[in-house]
Image (spheres, rainbow, N blue to C red):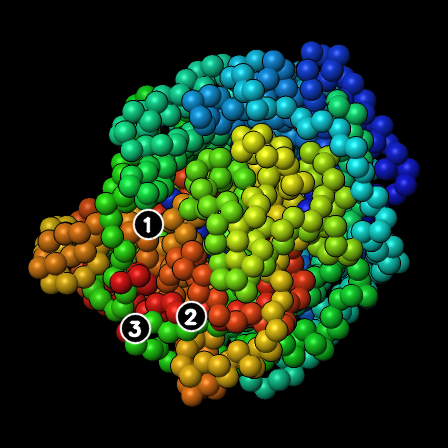
């Protein structure tokens, strides 16, 4: 359905860390087309002049505090939705607002507004300043715009300047391909979404940064029915790319056919087994394992608060030496990529685990300062109403040397997890991920297709039980979203074929 | 920051009417305008110190326009007149590119109007509550929790308050507005040494400040919920009865809602699509959606389309009596809206399972061996099939008594079998959220361990 999400609900602040990665397309080749649209100007459009920004920063520091920041965001969003053979509706939305943050010691004050008049902005600054209401006023440095940063965005045909008809055509193509893929497909839903986020970040240390981040997504859902059974298939793709992506990298027909294929496949699948057994994870989709079992627990806020099981494990061995894990926000065209993070820090690759040893963290400014380490460019926020926190971008495990066939051949009786819905972790290291479809492994071969099972384990146990790592690194579908503290951000996960010697599978047989 | 005051309400109603008029004059056959205006305060306290303090006000506006039975939506947090008018004009243009849909369109103006006053959703106390008091509540909650020696770390305590006004107008003559307050006090804790931590939280959420549980009660509950998990074991894979604590029943009901939503039904994405009038649960089970309960978080005088909220019996003694619909889903199903429009398909009002006769202790005593389910981890619920498979934490029951905590297990089953297999229903229903239920005992589920 379309979006009309306007009756305001109070925001619920509670720590939930979940990831929904649906399933993926093929690996995107980073094509090196330069992005170039005329830069949007917050100054011309909304009157946010350097002098006004400086004034707001000074107001934010009027009660003291070590650091102040203005985050301005203007985001346009468009969507198209098709079901029952018709274009049901289209939607467009505009998000405009400014978030003002003051840090005093380890404390954060935050105010936001979507009225950008100087009076309202100063009022928001004073709300944020309340956190530091004890010390003497400080002041902001002169603003200097940061130099050009290599962009990971790859847009030739910006969706915002393409006619609506061309985007409707993509949706229709995916829909038609899905519907005609098999007579058992009874219901199809297809959708297109694109957004363009303009942002301005200014802080009291003198940083002034701008960026504009594109995003597109094409998705398809198939419901297949046969002999009273009904199953669901999903597929999608996109990323920080333009419409050319759906011509060169992933066609709408592929998206539609893949959704149909998954639903049809599940019609013939039987319930998954239950109990402890060897588990082989398919490449790409299974990156959700790394995201949950490692990524979240090396986010520096959980480390400095000592809630993460990893807080005292820096430099220590926590898993098999086959395991090396990175997070890289600079991978071209990827959904999780950005040139600067939401605090204006230039993004870069962070190595989290090297040969089973903890080597690094995902940092935002506050955690880095408290831990006396360097920011890594992983301070992200959902939008201007949110305080930035350490987050993942594109998280992956380095490929090993074992061919996939050898890994499967090594298992006498086990479970092959093929498609993933998502996962969740808590700070103790207990984590789950849900598999939508897989296969039994019997005598070194994939045999009966099976459906729906959640797998559960403790991260230290499971990282230690990674017995084989394939040579076939692949990536999740460009549709994943990670949720933490009620904030959703786009992410990607990558992973080669992996064998875990033993893990609990929650099937129904 | 600003509070949505009386003068503000008048202005918003006027703005909504003006935009409806503008939409009609610009060529829309029908137009609906929703405006939200709210203020938010939130404080997070950890280890006795304020970690973050947020104070803000936001407004947003959303439209639906219909032209020649074709629909377009738009929304904006930029409320400047030019932006809003452009969005309406654009939406009318975009609508022309959608397909005609005979089921589209706004509902006719209802002859009944719900008076917001008796719903009592607004607590004027919010205007007198100063930041120091709110911060104090969070500090006190965490302080009591940390005074227990078994608690080894804290995620912090939080207090949230919100005050939001909702305005809705449409071209069929509907014009309505109501104001709702919200208060939430919570704390999340860890117990045990670094490599064997367990965690849990507790909270109280109400529309009225004086209904909120005191810090002492929230802290003590959070402590008890956390430390009871210390020293967990893993159990062998087997089929056993599973007792759901109230919060776990709520999770199950959230899943059931997605299966009885009219939107899922016409989309055939629920295993219950053809089951109206048939048995879908044990005869002990009655499930209701009621938007008219005073002070409850899921109550409102009208839904997102301006239809009056009401009480709908969804499951009566195990028989599926009604799906929950917005106008669109209702037209597709040949029924009428149940007042469940949520802006994007159907959404729950207060969706709950009625309480039964048994105390939770009695339910545990009825169970020679089984699992008391206290937390779940992960997704693993598929409305198309009803299949459930989730990570689980619980307390193992032996000889009709709680014996030891268990973790790193999964529970699996199918919602159809689970609902039909409910043998006992608890008397401990509490309205902690819009979706809630009491303790229930399910005859058998598959628990996977080692």
Q: Residues within 10 Å of mark 2 (few under 14, many from 20)?
A: many
Q: Quadrant of residue A310?
A: bottom left
| Quadrant location of the C terminus of chain A in the rendered image | bottom left
Work out whether A70 lies above or below A177.
below
Q: CA distance from mark 1 to mark 2?
A: 26 Å
Q: Which residue is mark 2?
A: B443
Q: Which residue is mark 1?
A: A436
The structure residue drawn at horizontal position 78% and vertical position 55%, both measured from the top left corner, is: B294
Callout 1 and callout 2 share a chain: no
Q: Is residue A148 visible?
A: no
Q: Residues within 10 Å of mark 1 (few under 14, many from 20)?
A: many
> Which SS class for mark 2?
strand
Q: Nearer the viewer, mark 1 or mark 2?
A: 2
The structure residue drawn at horizontal position 41% and vertical position 52%, both measured from the top left corner, is: B386
Q: Quadrant of residue B172?
A: top right
Q: Is residue A446 visible?
A: yes
Residue in the foreground of this view, choosing between A210 and A334? A334
Residue in the foreground of this view, choosing between B100 and A486? B100
The structure residue drawn at horizontal position 60% and vertical position 69%, both measured from the top left corner, is: B356
Q: Nearer the viewer, mark 1 or mark 3?
A: 3
Q: Which residue is mark 3?
A: B237
Do the residues under discs 1 and 3 have CB atoms within 8 angstroms? no
Do the residues under discs 1 and 2 have CB atoms within 8 angstroms? no
Work out whether A398 lies above or below A255.
below
Q: Where residue B21 sits in the image (x, y, percent)?
A: 78, 18
């Amino acid at each position: 359905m379309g979006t009309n999400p306007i009756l305001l609900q109070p925001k619920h602040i509670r720590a939930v860390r979940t990831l929904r990665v649906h399933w993926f397309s093929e690996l995107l080749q980073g094509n090196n087309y330069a992005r170039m649209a005329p830069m949007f100007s917050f100054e011309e459009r909304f009157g946010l002049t350097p002098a006004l920004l400086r004034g707001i920063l000074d107001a934010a520091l009027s009660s003291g505090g070590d650091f102040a920041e203005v985050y301005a965001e203007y985001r346009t969003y468009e969507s198209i939705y098709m079901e029952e053979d018709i274009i049901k509706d289209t939607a467009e939305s505009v998000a405009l607002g400014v978030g003002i943050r003051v840090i005093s010691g380890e404390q954060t004050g935050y105010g936001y507004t979507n009225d950008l008049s100087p009076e309202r902005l100063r009022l928001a600054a004073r709300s944020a300043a309340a956190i530091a209401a004890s010390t003497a006023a400080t002041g902001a440095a002169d603003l200097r715009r940061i130099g050009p940063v290599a962009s990971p965005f790859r847009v030739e045909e910006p969706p915002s300047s393409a006619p609506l008809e061309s985007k409707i055509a993509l949706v229709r193509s995916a829909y038609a391909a899905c519907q005609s893929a098999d007579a058992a497909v009874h219901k199809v839903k297809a959708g297109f979404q694109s957004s363009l986020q303009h942002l301005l970040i200014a802080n009291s240390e003198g940083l002034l940064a701008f960026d504009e981040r594109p995003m597109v997504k094409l998705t398809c859902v198939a419901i297949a029915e046969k002999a009273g059974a009904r199953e669901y298939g999903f597929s999608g793709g996109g990323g920080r790319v333009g419409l050319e992506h759906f011509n060169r990298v992933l066609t709408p027909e592929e998206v539609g056919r893949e959704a149909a294929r998954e639903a049809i496949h599940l019609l013939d699948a039987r319930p998954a087994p239950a109990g402890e057994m060897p588990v082989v994870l398919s490449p790409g989709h299974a990156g959700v394992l790394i995201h949950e079992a490692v990524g979240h627990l090396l986010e520096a806020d959980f480390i400095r608060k000592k809630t993460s099981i990893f807080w005292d494990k820096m430099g220590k061995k926590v898993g098999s030496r086959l395991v090396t894990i990175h997070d890289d926000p600079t991978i071209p065209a990827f959904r999780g990529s950005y040139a600067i993070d939401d605090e204006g820090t230039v993004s870069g690759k962070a190595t989290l685990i090297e040969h089973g040893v903890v080597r690094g963290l995902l940092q935002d400014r506050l955690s880095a300062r408290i831990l006396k380490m360097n920011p890594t460019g992983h301070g992200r926020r959902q939008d201007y109403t949110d305080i930035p926190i350490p987050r993942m971008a594109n998280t992956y495990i380095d490929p090993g040397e074992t061919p996939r066939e050898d890994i499967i051949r090594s298992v006498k009786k086990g479970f092959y997890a093929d498609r993933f819905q998502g996962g969740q972790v808590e700070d103790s290291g207990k984590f789950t991920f849900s598999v939508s479809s897989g296969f039994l492994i019997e005598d070194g071969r994939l045999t009966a297709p099976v459906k729906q099972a959640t797998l559960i384990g403790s991260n230290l146990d499971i990282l230690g039980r990674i017995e084989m790592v394939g040579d076939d690194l692949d990536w999740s579908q460009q549709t994943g979203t990670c949720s933490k503290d009620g904030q959703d951000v786009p992410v990607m996960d990558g992973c080669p074929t992996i064998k875990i010697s033993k893990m609990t599978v929650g099937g129904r047989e | 920051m600003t509070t949505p005051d009386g003068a503000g309400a008048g202005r918003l109603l006027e703005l909504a009417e003006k935009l409806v008029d503008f939409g009609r004059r610009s060529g829309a056959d029908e137009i609906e305008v929703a405006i939200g205006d709210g203020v938010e305060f939130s404080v997070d306290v950890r280890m006795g110190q304020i970690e973050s303090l947020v104070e803000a006000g936001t407004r947003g506006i959303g439209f639906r326009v219909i032209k020649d039975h074709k629909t377009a939506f738009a929304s904006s947090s930029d409320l400047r007149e030019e932006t809003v008018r452009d969005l309406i004009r654009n939406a009318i243009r975009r609508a022309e590119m959608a397909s005609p849909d005979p089921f589209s369109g706004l509902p006719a103006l209802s002859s009944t109007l719900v008076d917001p006053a008796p719903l009592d959703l607004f607590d004027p106390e919010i205007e007198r509550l100063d930041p120091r008091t709110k911060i104090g509540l969070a500090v006190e909650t965490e302080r009591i929790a940390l005074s227990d020696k078994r608690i080894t770390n804290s995620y912090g305590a939080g207090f949230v308050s919100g005050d939001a006004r909702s305005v809705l107008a449409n071209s069929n003559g509907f014009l309505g507005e109501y104001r709702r307050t919200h208060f939430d006090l919570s704390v999340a804790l860890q117990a045990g040494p670094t490599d064997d931590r367990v965690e849990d939280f507790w909270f109280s959420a109400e529309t009225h400040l004086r209904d909120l549980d005191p810090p002492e009660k929230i802290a003590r509950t959070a402590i008890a919920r956390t430390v009871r998990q210390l020293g967990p074991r893993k159990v062998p894979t087997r089929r056993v009865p599973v007792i759901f604590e109230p919060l776990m029943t709520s999770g199950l009901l959230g899943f059931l809602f997605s299966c009885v939503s009219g939107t899922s039904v016409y989309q055939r994405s629920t295993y219950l699509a053809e089951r109206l009038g048939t048995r879908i649960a044990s005869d002990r089970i009655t499930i209701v959606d009621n938007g008219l309960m005073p002070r409850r978080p899921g109550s409102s005088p009208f839904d997102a389309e301006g239809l009056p909220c009401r009480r709908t019996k969804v499951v009566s003694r195990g028989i599926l009596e009604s799906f929950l619909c917005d106008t669109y889903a209702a037209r597709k199903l040949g029924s009428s809206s149940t007042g469940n429009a949520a802006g994007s398909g159907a959404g729950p009002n207060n969706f709950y399972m009625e309480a039964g006769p048994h105390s939770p202790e009695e339910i545990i005593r009825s169970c020679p061996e089984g699992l008391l389910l206290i937390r779940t981890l992960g997704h693993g619920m598929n409305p198309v099939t009803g299949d459930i498979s989730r990570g689980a934490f619980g307390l193992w029951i032996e000889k009709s008594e709680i014996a030891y905590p268990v973790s790193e297990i999964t529970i699996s089953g199918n919602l159809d079998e689970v609902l039909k297999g409910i043998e006992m229903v608890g008397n401990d229903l509490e309205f902690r959220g819009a979706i809630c239920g009491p303790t229930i005992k399910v005859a058998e589920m598959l628990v996977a361990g080692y």
